[in-house]
Amino acid sequence: MSSVPHSHQVAATVGAETALPRSLVLLLAIGAGMSVASLYYSQPMLGVLAGDLHTSSQLAGWVPTLNQLGYALGILLCAPLGDRYDRRTVILVKCALLTLALLAGALSPGLPALLGASLAIGVIATVAQDFVPAAATLAPVEQRGRIVGTVMTGLLLGILLSRVGAGLISGLWGWRAVYFVAALGMAAVGIASWRRLPRFQPTTTLHYGALLGSLAQLWKQHPALRRATLAQGVLAIGFSAFWSTLAIRLHDAPFHLGSTAAGAFGLAGAAGAIAAPLAGRIADRRGPELVTRLGAALAAVSFIAMALGASLPVNAQLVVLVLGTIGFDLGVQATLVSHQTIVYGIDPGARSRLNALLFTGMFLGMSAGAALGSLALSHLGWVGVLGLATVTSLAALAVRLLPRR
């Protein structure tokens, strides 16, 4: 197996002629997972965080909301830079800035400072969306699907396992320790990327203003992009509403469970992410359109089952929650992988910008879901959160069932 070229060599020569070393694929997967995990550390420890900062759970809910909103803004404004500049440089700068933002979160003296750090973390965590197109560029054509799928599995596991790690660490040493550990992890990813990543040839010479302007042109030009973005964005509302309120639900009666238990639910979601490659194989054989419909339908059925199980005894409720979490996470992640397959096939020279538009829509949905989930929990209770998630899942299914123009 050939070695990775030094950083002065152009990445295109790597993917065109040689198989990628497994260590480099693993670095890209870990980098994507560690980066995107920064958005989700706060979710399982909101109960602990609200108590320590002497604030209400509803105000503490703005921490994950600003994470998601910052990520949507960062994808829209920063992710397209990967088409214009050397992606290696973009990755290194963002890794350094994300390390500093996580340290700012750990050292926040109160909620206002933490909210500011949360917005910054969200914006810079978009480095995750630089690792994925990097994999697509470096991979040989005949291995591109498998390698991008591996990196996406790393990203999805980062989303889900971040809750497990945050729950365990905050339960042992407090919520600030979570941000300190995350900062060390991102610093390690940055150093490894500096040592291992080759340079990347830009695919466009557009200046920044024209680069952003081309996003509108791509959006108008490709109905498949609009449809994928709308469906994934609506589906993300329910996904985020569930995860951003789960810790508070488990913290309150009748469960009275701590942040460690809330984080452990990430393991249930991880089972869904690990199964997502199976959805990729189905998409290869039967087409991604079918998988998007099956995924949205599975999410809706899972949320309905959890809502119906809310009246069961406590132990039975927990079982239904675990099974429902596995089901809807599998549905959401399978739909995302299939939407990326659709979008990446539109224009290979604009992958970063197409990816930016898809994920901007998705994380706008995530941000809205975090805010709406807190609101639904306050006024309608846990069943209200599950009802919201059911409606949004069915709406995503309706988008995918509409006939194409």
Image (cartoon, rainbow, N blue to C red):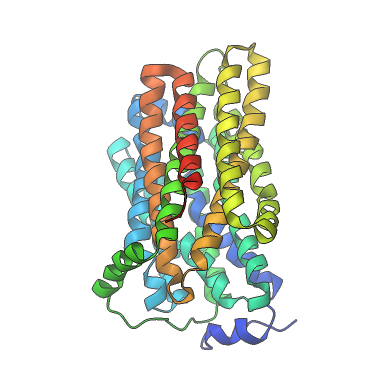
Could you tell me if residue 175 is visible in this image? no
Side of 126 where 148 appears, left or right: right
Rendered location of residue 152, percent (x, y): 59, 58
In this rendered view, identify the residue nearer to me: 338 or 164.
338
Side of 32 where 53 appears, left or right: left
Rendered location of residue 55, percent (x, y): 33, 26
Quarter of the C terminus within the rendering: bottom left
Residue at 48%, 81% in the rendered image: 200
In this rendered view, identify the residue nearer to me: 340 or 185.
340
Rendered location of residue 106, percent (x, y): 41, 45
Side of 316 where 47 appears, left or right: left
Residue at 53%, 49% in the rendered image: 181
Quarter of the N terminus within the rendering: bottom right
Could you tell me if residue 112 is visible in this image? yes
**Height in image: 56 above or below 35?**
above
Residue at 57%, 38% in the rendered image: 297
**Height in image: 396 above or below 10?**
above
In this rendered view, identify the residue nearer to me: 171 or 256.
256
**Height in image: 240 above or below 25?**
above
Rendered location of residue 213, percent (x, y): 26, 69
Which image quadrant for residue 92? bottom left
